[in-house]
Image (cartoon, helix red, strand yellow):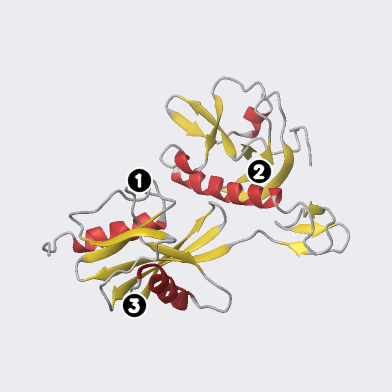
């Protein structure tokens, strides 16, 4: 839907506007914020493919695409993930939700059953085929992420996708017919050759890069010898709280697992 922002749109609505996977933000006086309706009315280009994604702190939130033509001073496009620490946390996570949904809309324009065009529904976040009525909801891919502990050490690995010297805990997508606990055991066995027990739930986190739901666990190592697969993992080792390598960014639940380990074992002796 292409619209001109009008009086029908709440004046205090938040707008998550994207251009080539970058989010439009307003910057000024040391703050980075999400534009409101009053800001959007000042822009030369107007939003397209507008969709409400619900109410946040009594403010309606809209997502849309927009061109980057003739931006006013104080507005700029930014990648979403690096905005952590610049946007307030509460806005950062709504921006992640917006990013997830806008990318799903972009890749769901045609029906997977008959090839006809899809239309976004107004009463729920779903796409409906204009021909056969097939419904499609946003894709959410469940994945496990696990901190494996051996005495006072944590297992960290380096993926070939990571920046140089970056390590994190093991993660992987859940396969059809598999429980999350079975996925934990399989991923560890396949990627680093480690067997575990005492798999305990830690927490979960939506991760919109691109469409994951991360389900985090802690586990105790039954075996200690590491055998990397040399496919997903290019290096792995055991680390104490006192000799940790370069770690993931703060917002990720992988970093939360490592921070939990560090706090729990920081007073133990180095072995």
Q: Is the residue 89 above or below the residue 170 in the image?
A: above
Q: Is residue 203 left or right of residue 79?
A: left
Closer to us: 169 or 6:
169
- Residue 204 in the image, given as x and y percentages of width and height: 45, 63
Task: Point out which mark residue 200 bears.
Answer: none
- Estimate the spatial distance between the alpha carbons at disc 2 and disc 1, rounded to whole Å: 35 Å
- Please, which residue is most extreme toward the front here? 230
Q: Which residue is mark 2?
A: 63
> Of marks 2 and 1, which one's residue comes earlier in the chain?
2
> What's the residue at 44%, 75% (across, down)?
186
Q: Is residue 130 left or right of residue 230?
A: right
Give the quarter of the image for residue 219: bottom left
> Within 10 angstroms of label 1, few (less than 14), some, or many (20 or more) residues?
few
Could you tell me if the residues under marks 2 and 1 are in contact, i.e. CB atoms within 8 Å? no
> What's the residue at 71%, 35% (across, down)?
47
SS at circle 2: strand
> Of marks 2 and 3, which one's residue comes earlier in the chain?
2
Q: Quadrant of the N terminus?
A: top right
- Residue 91 in the image, given as x and y percentages of width and height: 51, 44
Q: Which residue is mark 3?
A: 195
- Estimate the spatial distance between the alpha carbons at disc 2 and disc 3, rounded to whole Å: 44 Å
> Within 10 angstroms of label 2, few (less than 14), some, or many (20 or more) residues?
many
- Estimate the spatial distance between the alpha carbons at disc 1 and disc 3, rounded to whole Å: 27 Å
SS at circle 1: loop
Q: Which residue is mark 1?
A: 164
Q: Is the residue 235 above or below the residue 222 in the image?
A: above
Q: Is the residue 103 above or below the residue 33 in the image?
A: below
- Residue 258 in the image, given as x and y percentages of width and height: 31, 58
> What's the residue at 64%, 45% (across, down)?
60
> Of marks 1 and 3, which one's residue comes earlier in the chain?
1
> Within 10 angstroms of label 3, few (less than 14), some, or many (20 or more) residues?
many
- Please, which residue is most extreme toward the right here? 131
């Amino acid at each position: 839907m292409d619209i001109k922002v009008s009086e029908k749109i709440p004046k205090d609505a938040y707008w998550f506007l994207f251009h080539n996977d970058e989010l439009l933000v307003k910057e000024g006086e040391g703050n980075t914020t999400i534009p409101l309706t009053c800001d959007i009315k000042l822009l030369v280009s107007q939003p397209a493919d507008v969709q409400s994604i619900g109410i946040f702190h009594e403010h309606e939130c809209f997502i849309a695409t927009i061109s980057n033509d003739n931006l006013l001073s104080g507005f700029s496009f930014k990648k979403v993930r690096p905005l952590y620490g610049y946007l307030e946390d509460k806005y950062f996570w709504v921006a992640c939700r917006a990013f997830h949904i806008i990318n799903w809309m972009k890749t769901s324009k045609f029906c997977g059953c008959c090839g006809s065009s899809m239309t976004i529904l107004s009463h729920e976040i779903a796409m409906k085929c204009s021909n056969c009525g097939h419904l499609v909801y946003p894709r959410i891919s469940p994945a496990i992420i696990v901190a494996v502990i051996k005495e006072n050490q944590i297992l960290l690995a380096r993926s070939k996708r990571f920046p140089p010297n970056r390590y994190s805990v093991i993660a992987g997508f859940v396969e059809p017919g598999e429980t999350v606990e079975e996925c934990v055991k399989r991923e560890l066995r396949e990627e680093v050759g480690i067997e575990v027990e005492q798999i305990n739930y830690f927490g979960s986190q939506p991760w919109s890069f691109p469409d994951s739901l991360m389900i985090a666990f802690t586990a105790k190592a039954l075996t200690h010898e590491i055998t990397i697969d040399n496919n997903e993992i290019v290096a792995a080792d055991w680390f104490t709280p006192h000799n940790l390598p370069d770690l993931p960014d703060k917002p990720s639940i992988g970093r939360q697992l490592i921070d939990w380990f560090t706090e729990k074992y920081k007073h133990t002796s180095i072995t």
